[in-house]
Image: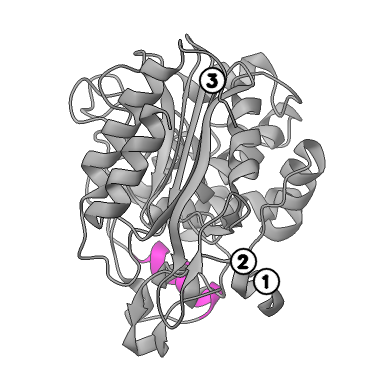
Amino acid sequence: MDDVDRVVEAAVADGAFPGAAWQAEVRGAPVSRGARGFAVVAPERIRATTRTLWDLASLTKVVVATVCMRLVERGLVRLDDPVGRWFPAFSQGPRSTVVLRQLLAHTSGLPGLVPLYHQARGREAMLEAVCALPLRHPPGAQVEYTSQGFMLLGAIVERVADAGLETLVAREINAVLGTGFRFTPPAEERRRIAATEDQPARGGIVWGEVHDENCHAMGGVGGHAGLFGELGDVVAFGRAMLGEGTPLLSPAARDCMTRCHTEGLGLRRGLGWQLKDPEGSPAGDLMSEATFGHTGFTGTSLFCDPVRGVVAVLLTNRVHPTRANERIFRVRALFHNAVAAQAGAGPASR
């Protein structure tokens, strides 16, 4: 057992999450990999494995952002194109200055954490509700993490490419990398899927369906949430974002996505990606300043350190059976500290 494994084992024992699958690698060579605990503890108990399917939550954002960048590479759309080109509600007043780059960097001024599912059901109704939200800040003035902006981004990507997000992820990501990211997994895959929260309004334990309520109200497919994937899928995606293995993007596009677009605005953000802030970063204390990644509300994360060639993936179901559990926030930093140290210790023994 290595130190990364010990961090995960201790977190399961402490109740930070019922189960987890993880992999840390350096330039394509695993230095730690495994699974611990349970993917489901209620209504039955099913152990987590490296082939468990996890609700990736907001890791969806970086996948959709990458699809968007592939369209940018083809000359189909510009980062500085106004959102009003696709949504007339953004063609008047301060909204008229909101551009795709700001949706990607969370600087559009749109508020975050808005439970739109209380007032709207269905994809078009949810998008109309997003468009009706008042801006909380002037566009470009401040970073505020907002799933609402990525709901719009997902719809814009669909309109630019004239295809649904399911088709675009299958074509632009899975077909290139050989991954199996999917929205709305079929019922026969349920026993492979990690369960999430007990939500009485949805009939109890959410299992095999997206956890995010806004995404669920949109039919399970959104630019902000909805993707399911297993450990190998997320590792392959992270590897591609380091420019190793099968490339997804040109070096120019990868550099554009992973450099800071929010200098002087508080939090450091790339395009879709969370960069390493000086304090409180889920990437921990030892990953380099060039590290980029993202977390998901359900307990998932992917962080990449291009200086050391590290890909670190931790997939958990920390909201199972309740979201009233914040131990994951400390565990992520502990995990990445152990990964950074282990990265120089040689390949994994299993």
Which element carries disc 2, helix, strand or loop? helix
Let me know if residue 36 appears in the view. yes
Q: Residue 192 bears which disc, if any?
A: 2
User: Which residue is more in the foreground, 54 or 213?
Assistant: 54
Q: Residue at x 33, y 64 (%)?
A: 319
Residue 298: image x %, image y %?
Answer: 39, 58
Magenta span covers which residues?
Answer: 122-132
Residue ID for mark 1: 189
Residue 278: image x %, image y %?
Answer: 21, 20
- Tell me how far mark 2 sits from mark 3, CA to CA: 36 Å
Residue ID for mark 3: 256
Q: Residue at x 64, y 21 (%)?
A: 28
Which quadrant does the N terminus fall into? top left
Q: Residues within 10 Å of mark 2 (few under 14, many from 20)?
A: some
User: Which residue is more in the foreground, 179 or 11?
Assistant: 11
Chief SS of the magenta region: helix
Q: Residues within 10 Å of mark 3 (few under 14, many from 20)?
A: some
- Dots 1 and 2: beta carbons under 8 Å? yes
Which quadrant does the C terminus fall into? top right
- Dots 1 and 3: beta carbons under 8 Å? no
- Is residue 292 shown left or right of residue 93? right
